[in-house]
Amino acid sequence: MKFQAFEIDHIEKMLAFSLNYSELIQRNSALICAAQNEFNNKLKLLTGNELLDSFVEQKKTGTDRPGKTVLFFGSLILIPFSLIKLFYNLKKLII
């Protein structure tokens, strides 16, 4: 009789644990579902231009205008002015 009471107590504790775990999973699933719905709604409101603007803002691309392009030593090769300045500064560091 003593052993049976111990087993019943253990089974009831395991049942309570299982019910708590099941409720936790259910709440978690509901939160995930709500987050997914919110994400889908936000995606539906976005446009291609907004995504591009967001990308440019995050990556900081396209904010600076390109430098001047100069003809180098009369050849047909066009070299950006910023690249010429970089080589000039490197030359000063080496010498």
Image (tube, rainbow, N blue to C red):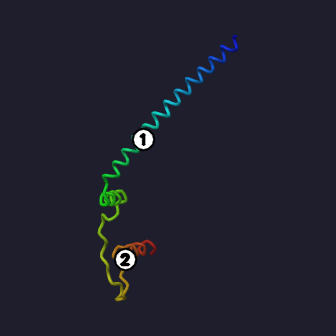
Residue 77, above or below 54: below
Q: Residue at x 32, y 65 (%)?
A: 62
Work out whether mark 2 precedes mark 1 in sequence or the reverse, and give the earlier one.
Answer: 1
> So how many labels did they put on this image?
2
Can you say whether 77 is above or below 22 in the image? below
Location of mark 2 (residue): 84
Q: Which labelled disc corresponds to residue 24?
A: none
**Can you say whether 93 is above or below 73 in the image?**
above
Residue 10 occupies which quadrant of the picture? top right
Disc 2 and disc 1: Cα gap in Å?
A: 56 Å
Considering depth in this image, is 77 or 33 the residue closer to the camera?
A: 33
Secondary element type, mark 1 = helix
Q: Position of residue 8 (x, y in %)?
A: 63, 17
Quarter of the N terminus within the rendering: top right
**Amino acid marked by disc 1:** Cys
Q: Is residue 11 left or right of residue 69?
A: right
Quarter that holds the C terminus: bottom left
- Given residues 11 and 77, the one toward you in this image is 11
* Residue, far top: 1
Q: Give the residue displayed 30% in from the left and 66% down from the top.
A: 64
Left or right of 36? Residue 24 is right
Spot the residue most to the bottom: 74
User: Which percent across, then down, holds residue 60?
Assistant: 34, 60
Q: Which residue is mark 1?
A: 33
Question: Are there few (<14), some (14-19), or many (20+) residues within 10 Å of tag 1?
Answer: few
- Residue drawn where x is 29% and y is 69% of the image: 65
Classify residue 50 by image quadrant: bottom left
Amino acid type at mark 2 = Ile
From the top left corner, tell me how far across and down residue 18 is, in percent: 56, 27
